[in-house]
Image (cartoon, rainbow, N blue to C red):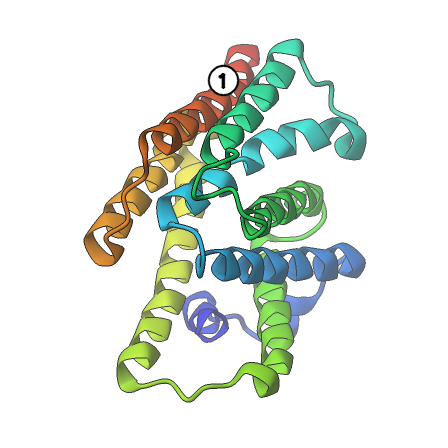
Amino acid sequence: MHIMLMLVVLRPPSFKTLIITKNPKLQIIRGLCMVNTNLMFISALHFIPLAEGTAIIYLSPLLVTAMSGPLLGERIARLQWIAVAIGFIGVLFIVRPGGSMFHPVALLALGAALSFSVYQIITRKLNHTDRSSTTNFISGLISAIVTSLLLPFFWKTPTLYFALLMVLLGISALVSHLWMTKAYQHAKPSTLAPFSYMQLLFAGFIGYVFFNQTPDFMGLIGMLVIVAGGLLVFSKVSYKK
């Protein structure tokens, strides 16, 4: 759905204009990171609540900060390292010994956060060589190919209800991405970062209304700690600018 809608929205003069890249190796790795992130996160949601899983994914801004030094050659300030440490403390609040989240399955959400961080690092590199439309289309195309290869092993014919949900998922993915891209054309990442953490509130609301899931007190503390660490990173970036 995502790929088909991109073709409709972008209306390229030819298919070739969307797949020509100066860095095919990185494009393939980025696409595989997208597949891996989605598969691990969706698999984790079979076992852990939506709000807690989303909170763990929000480690990615902190992981990107930690990896920017060795992978991008960027200088990481002491305050940013403190923010990374704060974020991991938040995860320990959520995935704590004796808690309902203390289960090997939580590693799937952590793996998704790590994969998503690599995805973002590669996106930064590709921004210097390829158009964003090309990058997003190739990643979506690779995702469609890889997941199609997996279908024979896991296929279940969806009911009309679930088919409609999958269509809505594709539309939601495209619309949210386009709006996010448009927002970054008009505002700095440090300005928009606080709004991105609204997703935690939405995840908590949806988890409660549709799945009767409510984070416990320690889980809520962990979410707030992760948000604090992420905002500390962006406040440092904003201060430097």
Residue drawn 34% across the image and 80% down it:
163
Q: Position of residue 219 (x, y in %)?
A: 38, 33
Residue 62, can we see it? Answer: yes
Locate residue 70: give its quadrant.
top right
Direction from residue 164 to residue 170 in the image, left or right = right
Q: Image height check: is 16 above or below 51?
A: below
Direction from residue 23 to residue 30 in the image, left or right = left
Residue drawn 35% across the image and 61% down it:
172
Query: Which residue lies most toward the front here?
Result: 98
Image mark count: 1
The amino acid beneath tag 1 is: Leu
Residue drawn 62% across the image and 53% down it:
131
Q: Position of residue 152 (x, y in %)?
A: 59, 87
Q: Image height check: is 238 above or below 195?
A: above
Label 1 Cα crowd, 10 Å radius (few <14 / some 14-19 / many 20+): many
Residue labelled with disc 1 = 232
Closest to the observer, 120 or 158? 158
Locate residue 14: give its quadrant.
bottom right
Per the image, label 1 sits on a secondary structure element best described as helix
Direction from residue 25 to residue 127 in the image, left or right = left
Closest to the observer, 89 or 231? 89
Q: Position of residue 218 (x, y in %)?
A: 38, 28
Q: Position of residue 134 (x, y in %)?
A: 61, 60
Locate residue 13: give its quadrant.
bottom right
Query: Which residue lies most toward the left here?
Result: 209
Q: In the rendered view of the protein, which quadrant contains the N terminus? A: bottom left
